[in-house]
Amino acid sequence: MNIPQISLNFTALLPEIVLTAFASVILLTGLLKIRNEILVWSSVIFLLILVLIVPGFEGKAFGEMFLNDFLAVYLKLIIIIGTVLSLLVFNSYLKEKLILLNESIALILFSALGMMLLVSARELISFFVSFELMSLSIYVLVGIRRYDKRSNEAAVKYFMLGGVSSAIMLFGIASLYGATNTTDFSVLIKALSNHVVLAYTGLGLFIIGLCFKIALVPFHMWAPDVYEGAPTPVTAFISTLPKVAVLGAFGRILIEIFKDYYIDWSSFLIVLSIATMVMGNLFALVQRNIKRMLAYSSIAHAGYIIIGLIVGTQTGFNAVVVYLLIYTFMNIGAFAMVIAFNEEDIESYKGLHRFHPALALAMLIFMFSLTGVPPTAGFIVKFNILLQAVRGGFTWLVVIAVLFTVVSAYYYLRIVMYMYMKEPVKSPVPIYSKDLEIAIVICATGIILFGILPVFLI
Amino acid sequence: MHEDAVIKNDINTELRKHLLISLLLIGLFGGAILMFGAAVNNLHFPVLSTLIFFPITGAAFIAVLPRQKEELIKFSALAISIIEFVLSIPLYISFNKATYEMQFREEYLWIPQWGIKFSLGVDGISVLFILLSSLLTILCVTVSWREIDKKIKEFYSAVLLTHSAMIGVFMSLDIFLFYIFWEAMLIPMYLIIGVWGGPRRIYSAIKFFLYTFVGSVLMLVGIMVLYLHTGTSDILTLMKTSYPYKMQLWLFWAFFAAFAVKVPMWPVHTWLPDAHTEAPTAGSVILAGILIKMGAYGFLRFNLPIFPEATLAMKPFMMILSVIAIIYGALICLVQKDLKRLIAYSSVSHMGFVTLGIFTLNQQGIQGGILQMINHGIVTGALFLCVGIVYQRTHTRQIAYYGGVATVMPAYSAFFMAFTLASIGLPGTNGFIGEFLILLGAFKAWKLMCVLAATALIIGAAYMLWLYQRVFFEKTNPEFLHHIQGYGDLNAREMFTLFPLLVAVLWIGFYPNAFLSFIDQSVKELINHVMTQGAMR
């Protein structure tokens, strides 16, 4: 067998290596008695330093297996910022519910590591390994409240379905490998043209595996249950960042590698996108639990996001990436509010404004941003995606999307309506902590700032 | 307690201090701005963006004031709205009526990646709405003085934010910016109706939001298509470009969706009575005075100049829709039992006149339509203020409950009479001029429609006079007498609220040229543009 010479080039991989080391150290601190604050804040500071250095490490490593280009760096920044916000959100909750802290932090960091590797992966094996690194950490996180039945159930459900999706994806990978005798994306694409049937099967299964993770209808069944059952900070984490990573990777694979098969996968995605917008929005309408409502709404958002992929152009994909950034702010912000308020029943949001005007205002911003009403950033990024779709000739799809935006306005506004217009049923006792406040403030100001000055965004 | 007594108790030293400070501020700002005003065009003072951002800053200022200092909050809101009005006076003084070109232009690069500019400018049409909006905002603040008793600072912040967004709509010369303001306005308005409104406020607020949102998002798709077709979002450039006929038709309907809901035209008008009825007085005034005008303004600014061929093709259809709204709205008014609901349905009828005027596509019709928008803002705004005044005393709006109001509240009755007559369109009031011009235009365009619309004038007189008779002349309800006892007739604040509108009614009624001269050139150019472009096919 002929083994080609490849350049290892560890430097391009340096941020990931450092992160691995750091996460391992955090895991080991369980042996020592270190105060929670120190762990959380040292991780936050570490990640912030990582934010500064990541842009400096563009390049390739291990031949073509690992590519760190501008888009990958951008996605990694979103992932790291999202992780910082998640950690801040996590901290107050862990104190409240007495959960093993260092393990949670380590798991979050490992999961983030998986995501970072995922968006750089240029080869099937490393793609799959980072995908699983991300997923396995999350399975544990979902079940981290060991004595809570809902949390356990969610973890089992997620694990089972996640396992199935991984198996499907692996089968797809195997087919692709069988068809082309290579795992390298760039070689694979050249070899594909000769083995059409197997390639199509592989590609289809591969896409389905990814769709599971993004919770596109009809592969969404696990999402509401898992989002509801998981501890709320974990929900904030898993409803945003894996989507960022997987959609990022998804887009790169489809648009850069499988671009010759555009007609096929785009028509497949169009069907999924419409189904996702319809089902996600309609089911969100009838939810009485805010976590479930946000779960269905985030399913619906995935439907909007993949419109950017359907366009099949680089600008369309860029619009997706920007959307993911703002989506991270909006969703983590909204879940942070759920934690701060410590209630899941929508009814109990009645009259929140009376007691906590600042919290209510932040929630108002998140809700209007999720709806896509200017002057929030949610509008700008949605406009950006839909603009690309119109440019690509998908005006009819855009009309469907905006009409379902109106549907979504109904359930987002219901929260605003409960907070501002209903009489309170009881005086809520929010969990107030500095970390949570910081996270909410960052999210809210980010949304308003990018909404008014989108120059920095696009 | 007697309201005057309440006021006397309130005027303590602190209050006097606030009053003094506000007046001082008004004097200082006003004087300075007026001095600028005369020379504003030469000095390049950014008067438009000041007008937009001043109320936003004011709203933020009010939002950070301590909640307990209610008087301070109210006086700040009053001062801010008065200063805003004073700031808008230069628009009236130094506006050049001899040209249709956009004036007071401002342009800053905003989103360079998309070539979108923060571009502002006004022509004669928009100047009038900006002035009207500034005036009505002051009155909204004064009328809410006693009516709004919860979440006061949020309320005044919301009113000021709405004002900013609304005048932003009238000033935008970039279609994207236009849309931002157009939508941003929904948020505070939704809260105003939903938080401070009547018993069915939540239903009405959601209905209002969803109806307008559906229309707006369809317009958004239209905006995207326009933007991608021309590569620019500059409204003036969009007007100059010509589009294929089929595309014009589609886009006409996309924009129509947004504007027809806003106007509201029949059959998408059903949100309006609900929203009007449930909104607090200030909310009704904003809705009737400015917000629903934006639909008609949108027709003038987008549908007519950008899609001239489609406009010409759709003209009969639009005229028929307008006449249906006129007659239908008037007939529904006859059977209303609620004061506010009656005035709300009369808005449907009056706005039907406006769209009828616009789609006659001739000088008289469009001028009349624009003037009628201003008139409707003044008269309906005034009528809502009047209803708010008695509602605050009695907490009911049922027409049957009232009776003999004229005997106990003579000054109020006089004001109400004047506005009723203006609403009917009696010569000498502003309503007459507007309706006359519209009918003149309609006669030129399509005689049958003119005749049908004119019959609605009779129904209009019937429902308004009948309303007046029932409320003011019939046998006095003893319960009402009991309620009114503590309050008496209008107090000084209420007089101050209604008086400017009465002046406006008579001013336009006797000397319409003071306002018509503003729109003369713009309308001429608009018709010229539509006819030449539309005939090219």
Image: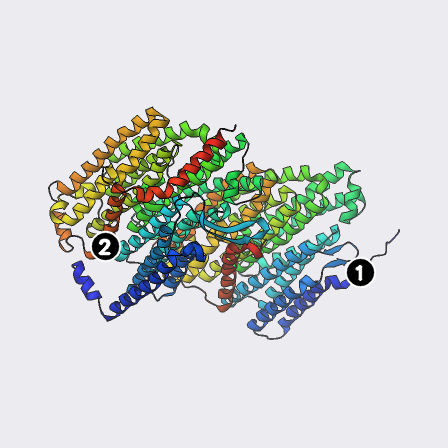
Q: Where is residue B380 in the image (x, y as percent from the top left)?
A: 28, 43
Q: Residue furthest top?
A: B448
* Residue B186 visible, this angle: yes
Query: Looking at the image, what colour scheme do you see?
Result: rainbow
**On the picture, is A345 further left or further right than B6?**
right
Q: Which residue lies furthest to the bottom in this view?
A: A33
The residue to which callout 1 is attached is A8
Residue A420 versus residue B362 in the image, above or below:
below
Of residues A245 and B335, which is closer to you in this image? B335
Q: Residue at x 40, y 32 (%)?
A: B361
Q: Mark 1 lies on which chain?
A: A
In the foreground, B144 or B32? B32
**Identity of the amino acid at label 2?**
Phe
Percent x, y of residue A142 = 57, 57
Q: In the rendered picture of this protein, how many numbered marks are placed on residues?
A: 2
Q: Residue furthest right?
A: A1
Helix, strand or loop for disc 2: helix
One can see residue B269 in this view:
no
> Which amino acid, mark 1?
Leu
| Coordinates of residue B370 in the picture (x, y in percent) | 35, 40
Bin the neighbour count of mark 2 within 10 Å (Cα to Cα): few under 14, some 14-19, many 20 and up. some
Nearest the eye: B147 or A248: B147
Q: Which quadrant of the rendered structure holds the N terminus of chain B?
A: bottom left
Residue placed under numbered mark 2 in the picture: B496
Please indicate whether residue B132 sits to the left or right of residue A281 in the image.
Answer: left
